[in-house]
Image (cartoon, rainbow, N blue to C red):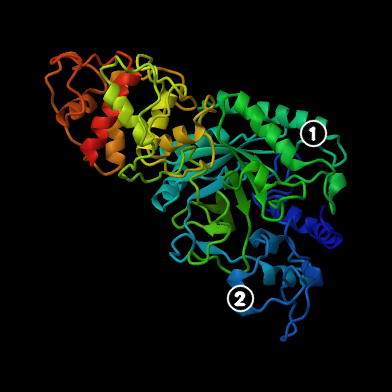
């Protein structure tokens, strides 16, 4: 639970955030059902400027977490929360508060400043309904990769500008993610079970609107977790935001959306306090808002343990149709694209792991016996059971991921998130295969139990060779096979033939649509490995 000092700070500063966001779109006040991102996050880590001490010049000085005066020379290392130019305008009639707030305000930033962190993503809502197609084009031209559009709030509000904003972002070649401003309860005293049910209802609303707007189930869906019920101002709700957020993400998954991220202030992203706990939600799934005193720097990145850091609300983009600041984030783990961050794959010489003969009792009559024994020797296979290999069974897509991961030396890999709804067994190996760009499935499905065809097998091996730098990124190959002219894996099959990895089903046919057996796969893997050495 939050301590009393922070609770008092929270209460004392709520009026600043409310006034700040009231001017965000030049409107009189923020509608109760349309909060912009950061509406509450602004004050969730903020120290009360009214109680700041006087510095040597007689001005109100900023303070740190322990109430100590912050010196100017450590500006970039000192956390202060978001008090933007919107605050400056809103509290101009309160001289003492204004002076303190301005002392603690993040700098106005300009998009052409190369010393800043990357501008990977911006988030917008109806407050940015003034943006034109030219503005979105400028975002793309200035290095932005993703536009995160507010889609919904609670169970009733839909951003009226969302459809146009999504389309303009797509027109500009930008990735689109969407966020939902979560309430989960209008009281901090609601029972957890009721909160969880509301979280699922909000997830259903969010998902249904996303589908109505034509967003694919691979779209990144963001839980904006910052809402403070009115009866909880200055304290914390009794219910657990982390548990409610887990229910929210689970319900989105049931709706087919597998890529859920969580937005929260840095003050909320702390384990053990019942807010947004990284150990339970996954730190790399979290998008953290934290604003530094002074100007953030690319040489002093913060919050790298999380998936993304929203480092400013005060970015002014050049060549825009209107001078109005946007929120900007650096995306450390590629969490907004819906894709796993790409990883490199190296070829390794496989050591002998099992010097003794294989224990498989069902391979003595197989023409692939020696290949199977080699696969066992270097640890690519452990058998279908400890004493059987099942050489005539078909290879599944899940098994293929395991074989290739082991052939690469079983590199350590912990996926930051799961991009598939149907992957549980072999999850790490399948996601490793995806991150290495060897297979992408058909998101959000991988079909791990589906059989691998001989044509697909050729593609798996050819892409693995490319990932290891053992095959050119592009190239055209030929073979004598007469049954592959219309097959989508034609070039991959021809590459296998060129390298001697396959001799064909017959000298002139390959049978690309036939499932590959486990015995055949043992031979292909052995020849493939020897080709790469």
Mark sitting on residue 255:
none
Left or right: 519 as drawn, with respect to 398: left
Q: Are marks 2 and 1 in contact (CB under 8 Å)?
A: no
Q: Nearer the viewer, residue 420 or 448?
A: 448
Task: Kindly identify the residue that appears in the image at 76 percent across and 36 percent down.
Answer: 184
* Quadrant of the rendered image containing residue 54: bottom right
Q: Which residue is mark 2?
A: 74
Of the two numbered discs 2 and 1 on the same chain, state the one appearing first in sequence: 2
> The C terminus appears in which quarter of the rendering?
top left
Residue 7 image point, x, y percent: 84, 57
Q: Which residue is mark 1?
A: 195
Q: Nearer the viewer, residue 354 or 249?
A: 354
Residue 438 appears anywhere in the view: no
Task: Kindly identify the residue that appears in the image at 53 percent across and 49 percent down.
Answer: 122
Q: Would you place residue 428 above or below residue 510 in this image?
A: below
Q: Residues within 10 Å of mark 1 (few under 14, many from 20)?
A: many
């Amino acid at each position: 639970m939050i301590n009393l000092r922070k609770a008092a700070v929270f209460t004392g500063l709520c009026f600043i955030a409310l006034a700040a966001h009231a001017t965000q779109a030049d409107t009189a006040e923020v509608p109760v059902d349309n909060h912009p991102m950061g509406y509450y996050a602004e004050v969730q880590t903020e120290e009360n400027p009214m109680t700041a001490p006087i510095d040597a010049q007689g001005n109100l000085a900023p303070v740190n977490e322990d109430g100590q005066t912050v010196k100017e020379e450590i500006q970039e290392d000192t956390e202060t929360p978001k008090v933007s130019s919107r605050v400056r305008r809103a509290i101009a009639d309160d001289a003492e508060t204004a002076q303190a707030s301005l002392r603690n305000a993040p700098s106005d930033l300009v998009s052409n400043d190369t010393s800043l962190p990357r501008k990977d993503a911006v988030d917008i809502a109806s407050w940015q309904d003034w943006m034109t197609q030219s503005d979105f084009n400028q975002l793309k031209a200035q290095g932005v990769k993703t536009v995160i559009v507010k889609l919904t709030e609670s169970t009733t509000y839909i951003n009226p500008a969302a459809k146009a904003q999504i389309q303009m972002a797509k027109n500009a070649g930008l990735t689109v993610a969407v966020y939902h401003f979560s309430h989960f309860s209008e009281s901090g005293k609601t029972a957890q079970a009721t909160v969880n049910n509301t979280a699922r209802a909000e997830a259903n609303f969010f998902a249904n609107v996303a589908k109505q707007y034509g967003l694919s189930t691979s779209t990144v869906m963001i839980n904006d977790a910052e809402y403070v019920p009115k009866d909880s101002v200055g304290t914390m709700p009794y219910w657990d935001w982390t548990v409610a957020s887990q229910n929210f993400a689970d319900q989105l998954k049931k709706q087919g959306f597998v890529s859920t991220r969580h937005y929260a202030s840095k003050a909320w992203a702390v384990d053990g306090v019942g807010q947004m706990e990284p150990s339970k939600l996954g730190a790399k799934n979290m998008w953290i808002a934290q604003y530094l005193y002074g100007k953030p720097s690319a040489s002093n990145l913060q919050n790298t343990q999380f998936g993304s850091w929203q480092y400013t609300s005060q970015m002014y983009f050049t060549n825009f149709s209107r001078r109005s600041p946007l929120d900007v984030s650096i995306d450390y783990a590629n969490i907004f694209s819906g894709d796993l961050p790409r990883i490199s794959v190296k070829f390794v010489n496989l050591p002998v792991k099992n010097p003794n003969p294989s224990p498989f009792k069902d391979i003595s009559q197989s023409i692939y016996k020696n290949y199977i024994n080699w696969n066992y020797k270097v640890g690519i296979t452990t058998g279908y059971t400890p004493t059987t290999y099942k050489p005539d069974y078909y290879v599944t897509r899940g098994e293929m991921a395991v074989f290739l991961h082991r052939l690469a030396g079983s590199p350590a890999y912990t996926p930051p998130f799961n991009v598939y709804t149907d992957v549980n067994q072999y999850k790490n190996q399948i996601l490793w295969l995806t991150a290495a760009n060897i297979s992408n499935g058909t998101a959000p499905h991988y079909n791990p139990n589906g059989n691998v065809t001989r044509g697909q097998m050729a593609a798996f091996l050819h892409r693995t060779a490319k990932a290891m730098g053992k095959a050119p990124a592009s190239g055209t190959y030929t073979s004598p096979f007469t049954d592959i002219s219309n097959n989508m894996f034609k070039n991959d099959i021809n590459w296998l033939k060129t390298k001697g990895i396959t001799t064909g089903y017959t000298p002139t046919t390959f049978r690309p649509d036939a499932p590959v057996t486990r015995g055949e796969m043992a031979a292909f893997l052995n020849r493939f490995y020897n080709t790469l050495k």
